[in-house]
Image (cartoon, rainbow, N blue to C red):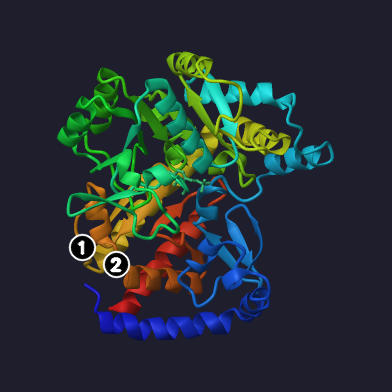
Amino acid sequence: MINPTRIAQVRAAEDARFVAANPRSAKAAQDRAQGWHQGVPFHWMRDWPSPFPLTAAHAQGSILTTLDGQDLDDFCLGDTASMFGHSPAPLVRALTEQVSQGLSYMLPSDTAATVGALLAARFHLPHWQLTTTASEANRAVIRWARAITGRSKILIFNGCYHGAVDDVFVDLRDGQPETRQSLVGQVWDVRDHTIAIEFNDGPALEAALATGEIACVLAEPVMTNCGMVLPQPGFLALMRTATARTGTLLIWDETHTISSGPGGHSGTFGPGGDMFVIGKSIGGGVPCAAFGFTDAVARGMEAARAHLPPGHSGIGTTLSANALAIRAMAAMLGEVMSPAAYAHMTDLAAELAGRIEGVIDRHKLPWHVARVGARVEFECSDRPPTNGTQARAAMDHDLESLIHLMLVNRGTLLAPFHNMMLVSPATTMIQVDRLVANLDAALCELE
Ligand SMILES: Cc1ncc(COP(=O)(O)O)c(C=O)c1O
């Protein structure tokens, strides 16, 4: 494995290289200190592994250009929001047309019918509602599941992330549930109504569901937010049969696993759920998200509301389903997220995964690579994690953040949070070649 002393030496050199190469970004970071808390408009932007965040000038397709004029091969792609490339032409056309026609009406625009039909056809669910973010869509489906089933508890998997959703922040430490330690201002005990178990643990799943207390299982079909954890054969099918048997709603959060194929992971490989959440990329960067559901869920919603007085539902916000978002989704679903785009993304991602495996072999590292369609992840551990605990144990922050910095210093941008790489319809083989060569060079230097 890689020696910590070497990591510290290389880190100092790479920090200096980054500072020297990005004087305008450095100046912009200083300028932002006036007005922006910690110099950024959103605190996640502090999470990049560099001494200060790069300042973006513009982006197109799979290239992000910094204020210092460097063209980066962008494999982060806005952490999935721009997974289909930055500013694809159909999206630009649609937004340009809408921009002079009003942006938010609190009425459906005539494009809404098109988008409803596109969502239903693509994801095989008849009913849809929109929100502004995937976090908000997840909050909505949890509320609906509780209202429909009359049960208060939800079940999630250790290590999951479903956005800024209080209910899901339960971790397992040594097998015991605890509220995620990093939460800010959390004053109620999330564990009261949330059960966390390990992904791929069939007996734990069956035991939790057998209590009859669980309203819904909220899950990604492949865990993508703690490195990547693939489902073991039969686990997703078990989730489907065990939830159906116990009257529990199965909710697929496919915000990230839309990388699997045009219908997301469940639409491509099955099994289908009772509800489906999708966000980020369906607006191509314009904030919007959607949740879909079956006829039975729709009937359950109507029955649940029939017992309630009129008033606030706690679901949705003023900008949900605004005209700009609807127009963006029409362009993305109708023209950009096409089977041809997926074919390119998936083939190139498979090539990327294979090539990274080659680099890992060449350096005799015990690491491995996981892939879900157009999403690739390398993990610096000796065996693929099968659950959140193993995934957490596999992470080596100092080493991984240094590799990210070395890559960015050589022209390749990875997502800041873990070793995730997205291949867009605009990504080229040359960019894959460069990523692989840069990773190889970084590992040579670390030896
Ligand atoms: C699986 C999943 N669901 C939901 C979200 C929340 O998305 P947003 O931050 O756009 O609300 C994320 C964000 O990373 C996610 O990975």
Q: Nearer the viewer, residue 38 or 286?
A: 38
**Where 15 falls versus 252 (above or below)?**
below
Q: Which residue is mark 2?
A: 396
Would residue 54 be seen by someone viewing this image from the given angle? no
Query: What secondary structure is marked by label 1?
Result: loop
Between discs 2 and 1, the one toward the N terminus? 1
Q: Quadrant of residue 184?
A: bottom left
| Above or below: residue 423 compared with residue 240 | below
- Give percent across and percent down for residue 36: 64, 69
In the foreground, 137 or 369: 137
Indicate the quadrant where residue 4 lies: bottom left
Give the x, y percent position of residue 218: 37, 35
Q: Position of residue 148 (x, y in %)?
A: 42, 21
**Residue extending furthest toward the right:** 100
Which residue is drawn at the image coordinates 73% and 31% (left, top)?
A: 106
Farthest residue to the left: give it. Answer: 203
The residue tagged 1 is: 366
Amino acid type at image mark 2: Asp
Contact between labelled residues 1 and 2, with CB atoms less than 8 Å apart: no
Q: Residues within 10 Å of mark 1 (few under 14, many from 20)?
A: few
Q: Is residue 341 left or right of residue 438?
A: right
Left-right relation of 61 to 395: right
State the quadrant of the C terminus.
bottom left
Disc 1 marks which amino acid? Pro
Question: Which numbered marker is on residue 93?
Answer: none
Lateral position of residue 207 relative to residue 82, left or right: left
Q: CA distance from mark 2 to mark 1?
A: 13 Å
Nearest the camera: 17 or 190?
190
Where's the N terminus, which quadrant? bottom left
Q: Is residue 292 visible?
A: yes
Element carrying mark 2: loop
Crowding around mark 2 (Cα neighbors within 10 Å: few <14, some 14 to 19, many 20+) is: few
